[in-house]
Image: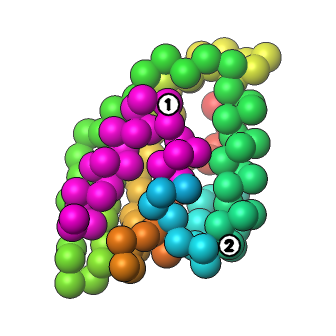
Amino acid sequence: MSNLEAAKDMYAMLAQGKLLEAFDKYYADDVVMTEPRGTREGKQTCRKYEEHFLDSVESFHDMGVTAMAADDAQGKVLIETWMDLTFKGAERVRMEQAVVQTWKDGKVVHERFYYDNSES
């Protein structure tokens, strides 16, 4: 399976609400995840962050991928995605982000999220 095919499968799992299952299947033990709010290292630490994110969501309404591309020579997959959700005690929001993943041996070893982190 190519990195692009694996990423497509991962996002299909996300669309089915299987975030933690996708994480367990596709992330390396030494994964590093970077976003505007900081960097996390190691699968266990990153998984706890994902669990915390899920715990903060009251309702997940929809999500989609607007673009996905890969550079196999560099092990990179680039994804443009959006989520429509309601956080607990907050209003419904549409979150948009770009993601750059680095894959090695069928697993994500680095993932960087790009999104607007400003308060609106």
Q: Is residue 15 above or below residue 73?
A: above
**Does residue 13 appear anywhere in the picture?**
yes
Q: Is residue 118 above or below residue 74?
A: above
User: What residue type is disc 1 on?
Assistant: Gly
Q: Where is residue 79? Give x, y as percent.
A: 33, 53
Question: Label 2, label 1: how many angstroms apart (C-alpha)?
Answer: 23 Å
Q: Please tell me in which quadrant of the rendered image residue 44 appears.
A: bottom right
- Residue occupying the point 53% across, 46% down: 21
Left/right of residue 32 with respect to residue 3 in the rendered view = right
- Residue occupying the point 64% across, 31% down: 120
Q: Secondary structure at mark 1?
A: loop
Q: Is residue 102 above or below residue 89?
A: below
Q: Residues within 10 Å of mark 1 (few under 14, many from 20)?
A: some
- Residue occupying the point 79% across, 17% down: 89
Q: Residue furthest bottom?
A: 73
Q: Secondary structure at mark 2?
A: loop
Q: Say which residue label 2 marks.
A: 42
Q: Where is residue 39? Give x, y as percent.
A: 68, 68
Q: Say which residue label 1 marks.
A: 17
Range covered by the magenta-colored residues = 1-23
**Does residue 112 appear anywhere in the picture?**
no
Q: Residue 63 or 119: which is nearer the viewer?
A: 63
User: What residue type is disc 2 on?
Assistant: Gly
Question: Magenta stretch containing residue 21, yes or no?
Answer: yes
Q: Earlier in the sequence, mark 2 or mark 1?
A: 1
* Quadrant, the N terminus: bottom left
Q: Where is residue 58? Give x, y as percent.
A: 69, 19
Q: Residues within 10 Å of mark 2 (few under 14, many from 20)?
A: some
